[in-house]
Image: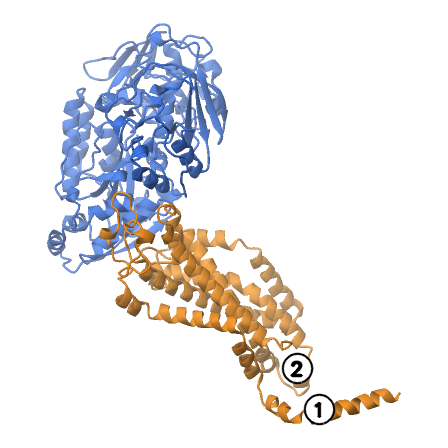
């Protein structure tokens, strides 16, 4: 019977012994802890740096192309073998003048087209992620917190959407959509459709995660306490639940962005993406399929662009998840 | 006359277009020396009478139907020469001689009455179907009657239906009340070897209609209606041994056919097989390795294989790159402002960089830049080129001048409509867009679902509502004369509310009058002069921007004998082929 007592005492002594260094930890906020963990994760940091670079490159595409390339829609027939329709130079016509070569048939600068393609990919991916997250969080929290018939209704809608043939639906939708819509024309309409469709069909994934979190959070003591102090539903949702959902939502957002990039590329590959001559990675890949034996470079470049972007986002997202994990070290 | 033309556009254009799928080939050249690039386009190569062996045809698309009354693919019409003979047929000759019709089942050219309305044919003697029963004029009449039953025998050309019905509303033989099922009044069969056609008005194109498979004889007792395409009864040198849809066709010799009754068929191989694959890669590899003899669809090698072949002189010597009778063009639609003004239309033609447009379709191998709308394989075609399109350069100064004359010196904006499933056409639209941008015309490209041609660009109201000022398309004739090619495109009477092909809605009384005048002439050369006038008038009006006179680069196995391009089909004449090694 005495042993436990002794043990406690020993533990107390131990605590007092290391009191000095412990003090430094005490002052750290959860965000600070996560940031420190992230800083230690070199792989995630590299991913983050590439993501940042890509975003900057997309924003400054016009500047970069004027410095290192040519306008993305400019034809360079002199770079193309007129009989074969493939670039004259080796490796897809790569040279100091054309950093990533030229595209077959027209001789447009691939470097510029990849940069402008990054704009389309990133805009569509980010905005559709924003759509998914907004709807997903809103409906997920509502389903988890209120439960009952609201939960049942929202959950069934989520099941329905998860079973929906999204890709086929989008292809069909794009072909029946008018050329101008709500003041948008051409590429604008296509991008809006892509954003709405990819975003809309993406929300149940995030909705389910948020619902599960909300379901467990609403039984927690601080929510009970808040309720017993007379807080209303709105207060509890916004002030008690949402702040606790930030971490999983943030992690999930960084992970659906690469999925969205792949979705956009797939839809462009299948001809449901933005319209030519606006460049997009998926469209470049789909063009390259016809000619991959004679001009493999043209397939490799947009393929690598997609690969690197998706990998960078995924690595960064994984690192973020580890950093925000309360059970992590 | 309208329905069939619609089908012509969808059927033929679909099959002529190059496949977009990934392709390639691994095999090297065979040891046999090639006859030379494009050698078969103008003459017969490897002429031989050596019989025996198996002709191995390959294709990536099965026939729309093997029933001659229901087929509309150019390559199937070509294949029908193996098993479905007609009163008149295109001669087995290279060059322009192949466009001439020779008596096939008929013993001589028809007797035509002085008013041009009555055609009388006498049949050869000794003609037999594959079951040994004689081919009579009644069998030919029955074959012509079948497509009248459009509920059963549909999909094929209906020119004869339109020409011969003459208000009778004949329902086809299946609902025919007369006991012999030969109730069509405009076709008479006074005896078994005589057939008489009575037309409502003279039509110099009529003989061409009788050369289509839809006018081939069908024995009434062996007619299986809609199922007839599973095993058509042969009147030619080969008969169907088997047909597995989507897989293969095997034709074997028809012992009832006799060489002495046939004006041109040599029937060299013992067997003809057609292998249908879904993998163009595999087909091109087999062609280059010699396992396959020739591509039955004759739509050209895939881009990957084409580049490989063009870079290897040995392989290139085994290819032909003939005109296939198609013109790839952009319709300029006057119903869509500002193209109601001829100067704005002309601005488009002057602004077009035709070299870029040609490159977009695959370069010089895929077609020659062209100045007008009558393809080289049609009598009456010439080098007329008022807009200097064959010079291959954008004429910016003239284009700006025309824009000023049109009252739009700073340009305007319009929409280019293009099928989404034809990469070459999408490329053409992109090239045109860039050309137009250089003179200040902003063009938005609208890619519509390529399966919906008839209801999108084929509907004048949709074209107008969507503001399709420019429509990218292609066209090939069903029969090689000026009316077969031009009439659906430029005759106002052919404007349809659905399935229209006259996108520009040209409705000029003078042009209509010229078509009627040409139809009344029996001399093809005189008619050709009129078609030339029509062609010139259409081009002068800037309703069409011709992109290229289309070509397809096809590979032929060097072991093939008697290879030549039949100009009426723009394809190698399959029935003439033999194999030199007897295997």
Q: How far apart are marks 1 and 2 (CA)?
A: 32 Å
* Residue that appears at 45% across and 51% down: A172
Q: In this view, does B457 lie above or below B577?
A: below
Chain that is coloured blue in the picture: B
Image x and y of residue B104, in percent = 31, 14
Residue furthest out toward the front: B31
Q: In which quarter of the image is the N terminus of chain B?
A: top left
Identify the mark at residue A15; answer none if there is no mark: 1
**Front-most of A315 and B488?**
A315
**Residue B501 in sight here:** no
Q: Which of marks 1 and 2 is in front?
A: 1
* Residue that appears at 53% across and 65% down: A203
* Crowdedness near tag 1: few (<14), some (14–19) or many (≥20) residues, C-alpha within 10 Å: few
Tell me whether marks 1 and 2 sit on the same chain: yes
Q: Is mark 2 on a helix, strand or loop?
A: helix
Q: In this view, does A283 lie above or below A41?
A: above
Identify the mark at residue B469; answer none if there is no mark: none
Chain that is coloured orange in the picture: A
Q: Quadrant of the C terminus of chain B?
A: top left
Where, by quadrant of the figure, is residue B444 drawn?
A: bottom left
Image x and y of residue B65, in percent = 43, 28
> Mark 2 = which residue?
A223
Q: Is residue B28 above or below residue A33?
A: above
Q: In this view, does A22 lie to the left or right of A55?
A: right
Q: Which chain carries label 2?
A: A
Image x and y of residue B139, in percent = 40, 13
């Amino acid at each position: 019977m005495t042993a436990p007592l002794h043990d406690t005492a020993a533990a107390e002594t131990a605590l007092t012994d290391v009191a000095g260094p412990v003090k430094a930890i005490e002052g750290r906020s959860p965000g600070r802890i996560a940031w420190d963990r992230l800083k230690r994760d070199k792989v995630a940091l590299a991913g983050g740096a590439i993501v940042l670079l890509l975003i900057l490159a997309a924003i400054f595409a016009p500047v970069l192309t004027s410095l290192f390339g040519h306008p993305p829609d400019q034809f360079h027939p002199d770079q193309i073998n007129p009989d074969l329709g493939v670039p004259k130079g080796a490796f897809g016509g790569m040279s100091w003048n054309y950093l990533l070569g030229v595209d077959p048939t027209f001789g447009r600068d691939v470097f510029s087209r990849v940069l402008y393609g990054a704009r389309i990919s990133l805009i569509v991916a980010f905005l559709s992620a924003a759509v998914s997250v907004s709807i997903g969080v809103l409906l997920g929290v509502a389903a988890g917190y209120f439960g009952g018939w609201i939960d049942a209704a929202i959950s069934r809608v989520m099941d329905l959407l998860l079973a929906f043939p999204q890709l086929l639906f989008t292809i069909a939708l794009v072909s029946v959509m008018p050329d101008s819509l709500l003041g948008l024309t051409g590429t604008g309409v296509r991008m809006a459709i892509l954003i709405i469709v990819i975003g809309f069909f993406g929300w149940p994934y995030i909705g389910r995660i948020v619902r599960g979190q909300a379901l467990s959070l609403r039984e927690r003591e601080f929510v009970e306490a808040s309720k017993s102090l007379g807080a209303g539903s709105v207060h509890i949702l916004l002030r008690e639940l949402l702040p606790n959902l930030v971490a999983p939502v943030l992690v999930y957002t960084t992970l659906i962005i690469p999925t969205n990039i792949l979705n956009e590329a797939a839809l462009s590959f299948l001809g449901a993406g933005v319209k030519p001559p606006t460049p997009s990675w998926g469209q470049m890949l789909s063009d390259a399929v016809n000619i991959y034996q004679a001009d493999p470079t043209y397939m490799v470049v947009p393929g690598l662009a997609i690969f690197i972007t998706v990998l960078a986002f995924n690595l960064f997202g994984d690192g973020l998840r580890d950093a925000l994990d309360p059970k992590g070290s | 006359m309208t329905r069939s033309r619609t089908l012509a556009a969808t059927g033929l254009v679909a099959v002529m277009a190059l496949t977009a799928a990934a392709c390639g080939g691994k095999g090297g050249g065979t040891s046999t020396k090639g006859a030379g690039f494009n050698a078969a386009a103008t003459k017969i190569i490897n002429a031989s009478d050596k019989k025996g062996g198996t002709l191995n045809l390959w294709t990536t698309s099965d026939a729309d139907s093997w029933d001659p009354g229901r087929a509309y693919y150019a390559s199937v019409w070509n294949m029908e020469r193996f098993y479905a003979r007609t009163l008149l047929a295109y001669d087995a000759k290279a060059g322009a001689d192949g466009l001439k019709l020779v008596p096939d089942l008929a013993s001589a050219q028809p007797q035509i009455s002085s008013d041009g309305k009555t055609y009388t044919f006498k049949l050869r003697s000794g003609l037999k179907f594959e079951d040994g029963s004689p081919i009579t004029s009644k069998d030919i009449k029955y074959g012509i009657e079948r497509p009248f039953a459009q509920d059963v025998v549909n999909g094929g050309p209906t020119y004869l239906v339109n020409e011969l019905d003459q208000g009778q509303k004949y329902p086809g033989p299946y609902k025919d009340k007369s006991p012999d099922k030969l109730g069509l009044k405009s076709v008479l069969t006074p005896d078994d070897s005589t057939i008489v056609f009575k037309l409502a008005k003279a039509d110099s194109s009529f003989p061409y209609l009788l050369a289509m498979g839809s006018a081939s004889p069908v024995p009434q007792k062996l007619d299986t209606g809609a199922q007839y395409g599973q095993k058509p009864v042969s009147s030619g040198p080969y008969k169907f041994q088997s047909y597995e849809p989507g897989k293969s066709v095997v034709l074997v010799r028809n012992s009832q056919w006799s060489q002495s009754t046939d004006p041109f068929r040599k029937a060299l191989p013992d067997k003809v097989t057609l292998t249908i694959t879904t993998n163009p890669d595999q087909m091109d590899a087999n062609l280059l390795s010699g396992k396959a003899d020739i591509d039955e669809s004759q739509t050209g090698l895939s881009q990957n294989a084409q580049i490989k072949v063009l870079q290897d002189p040995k392989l290139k010597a085994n290819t032909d790159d003939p005109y296939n009778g198609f013109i790839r063009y952009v319709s300029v639609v006057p119903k869509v402002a500002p193209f109601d003004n001829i100067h704005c239309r002309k601005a488009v033609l002057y602004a077009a960089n035709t070299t870029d447009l040609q490159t977009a379709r695959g370069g010089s191998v895929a077609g020659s830049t062209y100045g007008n709308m009558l393809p080289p394989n049609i009598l009456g075609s010439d080098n007329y080129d008022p807009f200097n399109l064959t010079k291959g350069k954008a004429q910016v100064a003239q284009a700006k001048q025309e824009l000023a004359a049109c009252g739009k010196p700073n340009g305007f904006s319009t929409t280019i409509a293009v099928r989404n499933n034809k990469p070459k056409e999408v490329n053409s639209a992109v090239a045109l867009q860039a050309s137009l941008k250089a003179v200040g015309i902003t063009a938005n490209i609208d890619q519509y679902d390529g399966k919906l041609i008839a209801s999108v660009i084929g509907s004048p109201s949709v074209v107008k509502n969507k503001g399709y000022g420019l429509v990218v398309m292609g066209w090939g004739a069903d029969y090689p004369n000026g009316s077969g090619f031009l009439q659906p495109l430029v005759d106002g009477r052919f404007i349809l509310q659905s399935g229209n092909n006259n996108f520009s809605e040209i409705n000029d009384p003078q042009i209509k009058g010229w078509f009627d005048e040409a139809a009344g002439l029996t001399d093809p050369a005189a008619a050709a002069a009129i078609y030339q006038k029509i062609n010139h008038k259409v081009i002068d009006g800037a309703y069409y921007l011709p992109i290229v006179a289309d070509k397809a680069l096809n590979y032929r196995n060097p072991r093939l004998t008697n290879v030549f391009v039949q100009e009426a089909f723009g394809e190698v004449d399959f029935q003439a082929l033999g194999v030199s090694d007897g295997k």
